[in-house]
Amino acid sequence: MPLLLGHRGAPRLARENTLGSLLLALEKGMDGVELDVQMTRDKVLVVHHDFVLEDRPFSAWASWELPPHIPRLEEVLGALEGAYVNIELKSIPPSDGREAVLVELLSRFSLDRIWVSSFDPFALLRLRRLNPRISLGFLLEAKEGFDLLPCLGVDWVHPQAGLLTEEKARALKRTHKLAVWTVNDPVWIKQMADWGVDAVITDLAGFL
């Protein structure tokens, strides 16, 4: 079976991307979690999906101003020690330096079960340059994204599930680890396992 990663934790049981939701995903049998990371004005990495919070750009918030349900990434990684963690780094070019902040934070943790993914190929290139030891994954939701893979030097490819066929999955597996999002049908999860997918990102923590 592939690794089962709770998409933003256990979103059907608890508020997504909160520490409680992430821990609940593990309690419900997930091998790990996928979570989203933004950076505040004072360069603190926190777990949150959107670029805007309460109609204000997330980058305009200071970390001490944030609602208590938004945890710091450092706190989350400490609490999830031993679990598989896929960090999706939210990024809009040009860089605001969040890659360097993330690399420094990750230097304090074991990288054996942590990898960083992004839709932004430039962010991935910067991360690769800053620390080649960090496993990286390229997120894509359009088939043209596959053409960028040879340029990025990433370890993982993260296609949206609708882009994948058995033939494509087996071809990708020759050069990369493969994580697919977001799969919420147990039959499809079994299909992904048969195709050799390494990880499935799912909302179904507590329902499998």
Image (cartoon, rainbow, N blue to C red):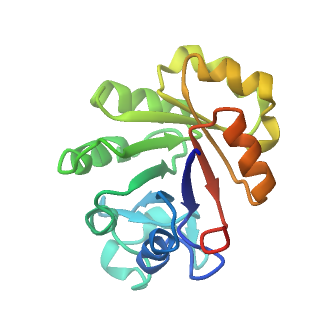
Residue 3 appears left or right of 71: right
Q: In the rendered view, would you say 114 is above or below 146?
A: below
Residue 105 appears left or right of 80: left
| Residue 130 quadrant | top left
Q: Residue at x 67, y 49 (%)?
A: 181
Residue that protrudes farthest toward the bottom in the picture: 68
Q: Could you say which is closer to the camera, residue 53 or residue 144?
A: 144
Q: Residue at x 60, y 69 (%)?
A: 205
Residue 196 appears left or right of 68: right
Q: In the rendered view, would you say 111 is above or below 14?
A: above
Residue that protrudes farthest toward the left in the picture: 108
Q: Residue at x 72, y 54 (%)?
A: 183
Q: Residue at x 30, y 26 (%)?
A: 132
The x and y percentages for residue 81 are 28, 60
| Residue 171 quadrant | top right
Q: Could you say which is closer to the camera, residue 52 or residue 68?
A: 68
The x and y percentages for residue 137 are 51, 35
Q: Quadrant of the N terminus?
A: top right
All told, the count of numbered labels is 0
Q: Quadrant of the C terminus?
A: bottom right
The x and y percentages for residue 123 are 46, 35
Q: Could you say which is closer to the camera, residue 59 or residue 153?
A: 153
The x and y percentages for residue 21 are 50, 76
